[in-house]
Image (tube, rainbow, N blue to C red):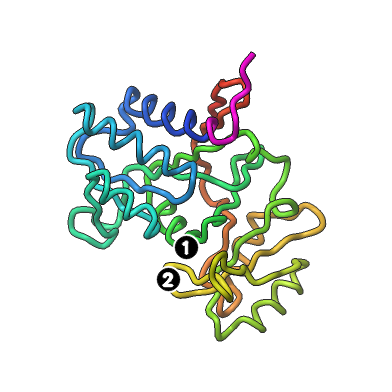
């Protein structure tokens, strides 16, 4: 039996989710849709563009979560709006995105691509939240394998690290690739990557971390339960 690579699983998840959501009427012409960031979410963007070209959809109004997704939409002909625009009115019908970890209760860690603040704004202002993943993202608990991203104001770096260490985290500043120094987000902030040695209460920590002065946002997504489409190595799709 063919075993699908991680890249193939991402493509399968993106294509299947868009197709099935169109068939269920959850993605529809004229809708306001949030589009996430990263190598899995971009597969859904490609599939949406194909659906528009095939006239399965019309007049999609997209709100994007990063420069990466904005540029892809421009190239593919998907119109992009601000969440603040009159067309959108601050509320999205559905947001579709990827994740870095998904626990059995569909709580998430997101932000491996550095777009966690904009991703959370889109997700938490959507009527429906959809997550795409390959099977490697399904984990028994959050926070001790994939680092939790915490977007911070640079001037608060030292006190924020101290506060996170008090919460039991080990923190490192995310460094750029092919750029000297730290990663700077689309919002002009820095990112701390945080790990815990033992399983944590992600819902409690999402609130506690955001209460630290100087934290812009963290990558725990626990306040709403998304619809998850996870592709497996055998080519099957788990929906939960």
When asked about the image quadrant of residue 240, the answer is top right
Residue drawn 28% across the image and 37% down it: 49
Position of residue 76 in the picture relative to residue 163 (left or right) = left
Residue drawn 62% across the image and 42% down it: 102
Residue 189: horizontal and vertical position, in percent?
49, 74
Q: Write down the residue under mark 1.
A: 117
Circle 1: element type: helix
Label 2 Cα crowd, 10 Å radius (few <14 / some 14-19 / many 20+): some
Residue drawn 37% across the image and 52% down it: 69
Badge count = 2
- Are the residues at dot 2 and dot 1 in contact (C-beta closer than 8 Å)? yes
Rendered view: 120 above or below 59: below
Label 1 Cα crowd, 10 Å radius (few <14 / some 14-19 / many 20+): many
When asked about the image quadrant of residue 17, the answer is top left
When asked about the image quadrant of residue 119, the answer is bottom left
Residue 8 included in the magenta stretch of the image: yes
| Span shown in magenta | 1-9
Q: Write down the residue under mark 2.
A: 187
Rendered view: 114 above or below 34: below
Rendered view: 230 above or below 204: above
The quarter of the image holding the N terminus is top right
């Amino acid at each position: 039996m063919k075993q699908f690579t991680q890249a193939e699983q991402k493509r399968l998840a993106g294509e299947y989710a868009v197709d099935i959501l169109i068939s269920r009427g959850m993605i529809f012409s004229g809708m306001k849709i949030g589009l996430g960031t990263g190598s899995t979410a971009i597969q859904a963007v490609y599939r949406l563009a194909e659906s528009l070209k095939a006239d399965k959809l019309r007049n999609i109004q997209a709100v994007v979560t990063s420069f990466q997704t904005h540029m892809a939409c421009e190239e593919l002909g998907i119109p992009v709006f601000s969440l603040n625009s009159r067309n959108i009115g601050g509320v999205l019908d559905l947001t579709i995105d990827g994740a870095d970890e998904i626990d059995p209760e569909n709580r998430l860690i997101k932000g491996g691509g550095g777009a966690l603040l904009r991703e959370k704004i889109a997700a938490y202002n959507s009527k429906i939240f959809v997550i795409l993943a390959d099977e490697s993202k399904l984990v028994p608990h959050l926070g001790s394998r994939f680092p939790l991203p915490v977007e911070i104001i640079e001037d608060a770096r030292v006190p924020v690290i101290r506060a996170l260490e008090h919460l039991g985290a080990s923190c490192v500043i995310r460094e750029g690739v092919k750029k000297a120094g730290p990663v700077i987000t689309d919002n002009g902030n820095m990112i701390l990557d945080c790990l815990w040695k033992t399983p944590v209460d992600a819902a409690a920590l999402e609130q506690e971390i955001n209460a630290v002065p100087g934290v812009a946002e963290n990558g725990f997504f626990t306040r709403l339960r998304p619809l998850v489409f996870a592709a497996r190595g055998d080519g099957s799709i788990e929906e939960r």
